Image (spheres, helix red, strand yellow):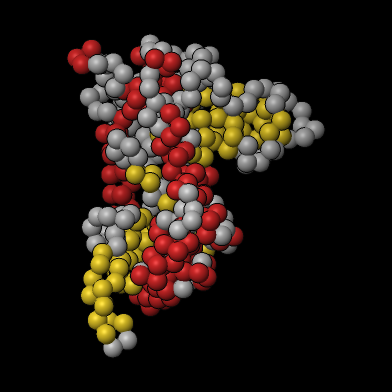
């Protein structure tokens, strides 16, 4: 018998709210299937299962706020007999259990069968938006969605009740959903800085060859098929991480475990505030166009509240870019248990020496945050050098 438990979806998670079951007792499930949706401070996350079998019993109730590790369901392997006694239903998180959690005083609504209808029932909306609309007694069909493709997201529901009549945010306190996300991010980053001995190396890199290459590549493409500079950054970081293996993996239980795949976390700014960094799975096997398509998909699903648990937990290195405009440089905080974060500033036009001439070129400043328990300056410098070489030959990416 396998007990499917509430997973940890990141260093900032201590509990989550079960808002949707995607399976019922008797259903067959395979490794990687989405079986539930859990709401955290970072939004609603689709939870995948990592064993195959038959769903015997759903233990946890919808709407329950449950700690990491709480049993959610019983999964029977092929040919396995039902247990004489199933695990007890988990106790919801109480206030005194979450006194030091970023999600203080989360109040769970009573379980109802319709708080998260299956896809196709009513207007398109994220699970978190459906839950909040149910709490407020709002009709989703009367709300205009601001998410990709008109999807109703949590922020749309929060502003649907105008003026002073608007209820408190779902946290039960005075903070909004964005405030709770900020608390969660702050808690995770505080733990990161306290437990990881960060050090930083920076380099300014000529990206004019990359920008010229993209201009030619995109000349005859419609906007949805164009490749952005960020995709080249992710490709270069992925290939550099595959070569400099000490930059790619997790530090857990007092030891570094290099990853055999490169799953770069891509930092995504959410509308209304907040940040997530879902992983682009198996990026080492992707082409440049596939990388761009995967990044668009991650951004769309992140803003619609439809990320998967594997994307939130299996990143092996994170890339955070300021995009086409903004500050020249950024220094990031490592997402534990990862051991490196690549921060890239916006391109700026600067005088640059090419051969014996000084010419105007677009350059970016790369700052790599690294874990000194795992790497040192020489290894980080090798990563940066490899990244720079790859960006100078964009046609090879």
Outermost residue to the left? 164
Is residue 7 depicted above or below 202 in this figure?
above
> Which picture quadrant has residue 299?
top left
Instruction: Identify the residue at horizontal 38%, vertical 22% (top origin).
Output: 144
Instruction: Identify the residue at horizontal 48%, vertical 24% (top origin).
Output: 124
The front one of 69 and 175 is: 175
> Which picture quadrant has residue 166?
top left
Image quarter of the N terminus = top right
The front one of 396 and 268 is: 396
| Residue 149 shows in this picture | yes
Is residue 76 depicted above or below 224 in this figure?
above
The front one of 149 and 99 is: 149
Q: Please state the horizontal and vertical placement of residue 277, each as a whole percent of the image.
A: 41, 48
Q: Please state the horizontal and vertical placement of residue 394, each as a whole percent of the image.
A: 47, 69
Instruction: Identify the residue at horizontal 53%, vertical 56% (top origin).
Output: 289
Q: Please state the horizontal and vertical placement of residue 348, each as a whole percent of the image.
A: 26, 64
């Amino acid at each position: 018998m396998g007990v499917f438990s509430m997973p940890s979806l990141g260093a900032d998670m201590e509990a989550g709210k079960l808002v949707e079951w995607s399976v019922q007792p008797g259903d067959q499930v395979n490794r990687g299937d989405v079986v539930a949706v859990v709401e955290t401070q970072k939004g609603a996350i689709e939870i995948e299962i990592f064993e195959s079998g038959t769903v015997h019993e759903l233990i946890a109730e919808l709407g329950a706020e449950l700690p990491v590790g709480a049993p959610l369901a019983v999964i029977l392997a092929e040919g396995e007999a039902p247990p004489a006694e199933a695990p007890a239903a988990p106790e919801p998180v109480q206030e005194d259990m979450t006194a030091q959690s970023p999600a203080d005083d989360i109040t769970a609504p009573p379980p109802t069968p319709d708080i998260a209808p299956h896809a196709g029932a009513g207007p398109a909306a994220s699970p978190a938006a459906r839950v909040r609309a149910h709490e407020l007694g709002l009709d989703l069909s009367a709300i205009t969605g601001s998410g990709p493709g008109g999807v109703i997201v949590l922020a749309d529901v929060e502003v649907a009740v105008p003026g002073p009549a608007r209820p408190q945010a779902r946290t039960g306190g005075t903070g909004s959903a964005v405030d709770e996300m900020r608390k969660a991010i702050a808690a995770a980053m505080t733990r990161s800085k306290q437990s990881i001995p960060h050090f930083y190396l920076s380099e300014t890199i000529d990206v004019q060859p990359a920008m010229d290459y993209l201009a030619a590549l995109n000349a005859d493409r419609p906007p949805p098929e164009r490749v952005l500079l960020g995709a080249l950054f992710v490709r270069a970081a992925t290939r550099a991480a595959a070569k400099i293996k000490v930059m790619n993996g997790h530090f857990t239980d007092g030891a570094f475990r290099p990853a055999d795949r490169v799953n770069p976390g891509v930092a995504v700014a959410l509308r209304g505030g907040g940040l997530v960094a879902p992983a682009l799975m198996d990026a080492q096997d992707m082409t440049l166009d596939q990388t761009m398509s995967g990044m668009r998909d991650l951004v769309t699903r992140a803003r619609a509240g439809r990320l998967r648990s594997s994307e939130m937990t299996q990143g092996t290195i994170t890339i955070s870019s300021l995009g086409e405009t903004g500050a020249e440089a950024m220094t990031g905080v490592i997402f534990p248990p990862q051991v490196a974060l690549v921060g890239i500033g916006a391109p700026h036009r600067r005088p640059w020496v090419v051969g014996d001439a000084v010419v105007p070129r677009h350059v970016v400043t790369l700052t790599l945050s690294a874990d000194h328990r795992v790497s040192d300056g020489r290894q980080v410098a090798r990563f940066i050098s490899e990244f720079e070489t790859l960006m100078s030959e964009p046609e090879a990416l």
